[in-house]
Amino acid sequence: QAQLVESGGGLVQAGGSLRLSCAASGSIFSIQTMGWYRQTPGKERDLVASITVGGSTNYAESVKGRFTISRDNAKNTVSLQMNSLKPEDTAVYYCNADIFITRYRSYDYWGQGTQVTVSS
């Protein structure tokens, strides 16, 4: 099995920046799409940004131009640089990855979540 471990959340003032990181470890044959989701109490978990193994990215409209997702395929890591943060970005952020543990078997993995709080 594999696991995802996140780091980098915290408290920041509006307009500030944070960088989230996520490292995959364990039994990994390859990793396809990696991404970040966020969730606030009582709401569904929504996609923030994703990146394919080839580097193609996708962003939620609300974060375009402010957030940047990147990955290091050699290190099995994905990061989210968050700039110009707004109070509405406050949420628990989850790392997600589509991990092949063998050539033909893949699973959808989630990190434990990291809290991001943006004060006004």
Image: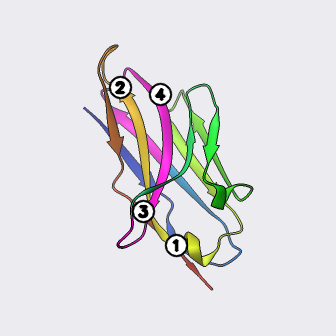
Under mark 3, the amino acid is Thr
Q: Which residue position holds label 1? A: 90
Left or right? Give the position of 41 relative to 75. Answer: left
Left or right of 91: which side holds 68? Answer: right
State the colouring used for the structure image.
rainbow
Q: Does label 2 or label 1 sit earlier along the sequence?
A: 2
Q: Nearer the viewer, mark 3 or mark 4?
A: 4
Q: Secondary structure at mark 1?
A: loop
Q: Main secondary structure of the magenta part?
A: strand
- Magenta residue check for 30: yes
- The residue where tag 3 is placed is 114
- Residue 32: assigned label: 4
State left or right for residue 31 relative to residue 17: left
Q: CA distance from mark 2 to mark 3?
A: 23 Å
* Pointer 3 or 4: first along the chain: 4
Assess whether mark 1 and mark 3 are in contact (beta carbons under 8 angstroms): no
Name the residue type under label 1: Thr
Residue 112 position, x and y percent, is: 33, 55
Which residue is at a point 49% across and 38% down the rendered structure image? 34
Q: Is residue 38 above or below residue 95?
A: below
- Residue type, mark 2 in image: Ile
